């Protein structure tokens, strides 16, 4: 008898203390979120999709009156973003390299992207990271186009005490990469990192040249390097490079200079490929693994 009474009281207090989230209540708040997310460099189409998903999930649900609707919606938004990020393919960088090494084989990585995004710097950072983790590394100066590119990579190699394979300017980039691979095989090197010339996705000749390098080398990994400062342009580049090369993973640089970083979400969502590292400065140590939970908490950091 008492149980019946207490459950009746519980029902009354729940009804009084709870409110149903109506579409009108949430639309206003979500419109504000929409603008904030677009300002964060997340593509408008993705933002629209995110907001739609949140609306569908929360409309008609009940929450305690004591709960702030905005914070409640942010939590939902975070979950939807995490879901998108978790849906993309994943790549365990060290695991795939280790697997090859353990079977006695060379692992080759080619780095792609438009001019100035940070390919050469990122290669040097990865070269150091691999070396620090006990892998032997050789660099291939397959950017034979841009003046100074060979010297730039050579200087990094000298500073990091890494071997670099070069040819002269104007040489076929595929030939340089092939040379580096032959060197690595004969010296039992674990990893070859191939630098390539920056190329606009609109330059058909250079894009064709890049597909040739890939066809000849058949690298184990193709990594797209995008510049976070380029915001939505980085996303369209990623899309086109993905169509041309079907790259395996992306690295987003200059995150230190751009606190927004929403391009990361867009790149993952548009290409379905993972981001494996973030460049957070010009020093060799300024490379960190991309972590979904970390990324989401930074994006939704309440200031
Ligand atoms: N702040 C910051 N600067 C970076 C980062 N990564 C690269 N840079 C800088 O970006 C500039 C271009 O870097 P590079 O590595 O030469 O770029 P690239 O893609 O090889 O350029 P090209 O060979 O001309 O296509 C350099 O001044 C780097 O120091 C980063 O994570 N943060
Ligand atoms: Mg370069």
Image (cartoon, rainbow, N blue to C red):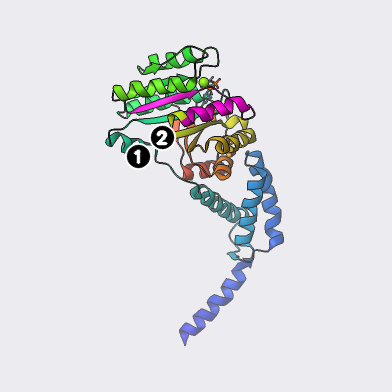
207 magenta-colored: yes
Secondary structure beneath dot 2 equals loop
Q: Residue at x 39, y 37 (%)?
A: 93
- Quarter occupied by residue 200: top right
Of marks 1 and 2, which one's residue comes earlier in the chain? 1
Q: Residue at x 49, y 21 (%)?
A: 173
State the image coordinates of residue 168 (x, y, percent, origin top left).
Answer: 47, 11
Viewer-nearest of labels 1 and 2? 2
Secondary structure beneath dot 1 equals helix
Q: For mark 1, does the 10 Å Cα neighbourhood hold few (<14), some (14 to 19), or many (20 or more) residues?
A: few
Please tell me whether residue 29 is drawn above or below residue 119 in the rendered image.
below
State the image coordinates of residue 149 (x, y, percent, origin top left).
Answer: 51, 15
Q: Is mark 2 within 8 Å of ligand 1?
A: no
Say if residue 141 shows up in the picture. yes
Give the distance between the C-alpha atoms of the residues marked 1 and 2, in whole angstroms.
13 Å
Q: Is residue 256 left or right of residue 193?
A: right
Residue 87: mark in rendering: none
Residue topped by disc 2:
220
Specify start and end residues of the magenta stretch as a single range: 190-215
State the image coordinates of residue 167 (x, y, percent, origin top left).
Answer: 45, 13
Q: Residue at x 48, y 44 (%)?
A: 292
Taking depth in this image into account, of 170 and 284 the one nearest to the observer is 170
197 magenta-colored: yes
Q: Where's the C terminus, which quadrant?
A: top right
Please tell me whether residue 147 is drawn above or below residue 108 in the rendered image.
above
Q: Is residue 236 left or right of residue 224?
A: right
Residue most toward the bottom?
1
Residue topped by disc 1:
95
Q: Residue at x 48, y 14 (%)?
A: 150
- Quarter occupied by residue 27: bottom right
């Amino acid at each position: 008898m008492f149980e019946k009474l207490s459950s009746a009281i519980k029902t009354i207090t729940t009804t009084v203390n709870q409110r149903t989230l109506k579409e009108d209540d949430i639309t206003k708040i979500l419109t504000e979120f929409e603008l904030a997310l677009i300002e964060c460099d997340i593509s408008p189409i993705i933002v629209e999709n995110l907001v739609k998903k949140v609306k569908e999930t929360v409309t008609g649900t009940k929450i305690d009156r004591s709960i702030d609707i905005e914070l409640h919606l942010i939590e939902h938004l975070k979950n939807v973003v995490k879901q998108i990020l978790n849906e993309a393919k994943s790549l365990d960088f060290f695991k795939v390299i280790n697997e090859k090494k353990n079977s006695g084989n060379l692992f080759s990585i080619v780095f792609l992207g438009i001019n100035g995004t940070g390919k050469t710097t990122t290669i040097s950072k990865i070269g150091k990271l691999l070396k620090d983790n006990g892998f032997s590394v050789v660099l291939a100066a397959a950017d034979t186009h841009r003046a100074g590119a060979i010297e730039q990579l050579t200087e990094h190699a000298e500073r990091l005490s890494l071997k670099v394979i070069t040819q002269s300017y104007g040489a076929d980039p595929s030939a340089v990469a092939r040379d580096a691979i032959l060197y690595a095989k004969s010296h039992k090197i674990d990893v070859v990192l191939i630098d390539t010339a920056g190329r606009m996705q609109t330059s058909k000749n250079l894009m064709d040249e890049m597909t040739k390098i890939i066809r000849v080398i058949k690298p184990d990994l193709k990594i797209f390097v995008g510049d976070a400062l380029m915001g939505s342009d980085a996303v369209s580049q990623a899309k086109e490079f993905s169509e041309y090369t079907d790259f395996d993973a992306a690295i987003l640089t200059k995150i230190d200079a751009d606190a927004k970083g929403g391009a990361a979400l867009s790149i993952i969502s548009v290409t379905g490929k993972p981001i494996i590292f973030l460049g957070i400065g010009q020093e060799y140590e300024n490379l960190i693994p991309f972590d979904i939970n970390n990324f989401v908490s930074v994006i939704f950091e309440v200031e």
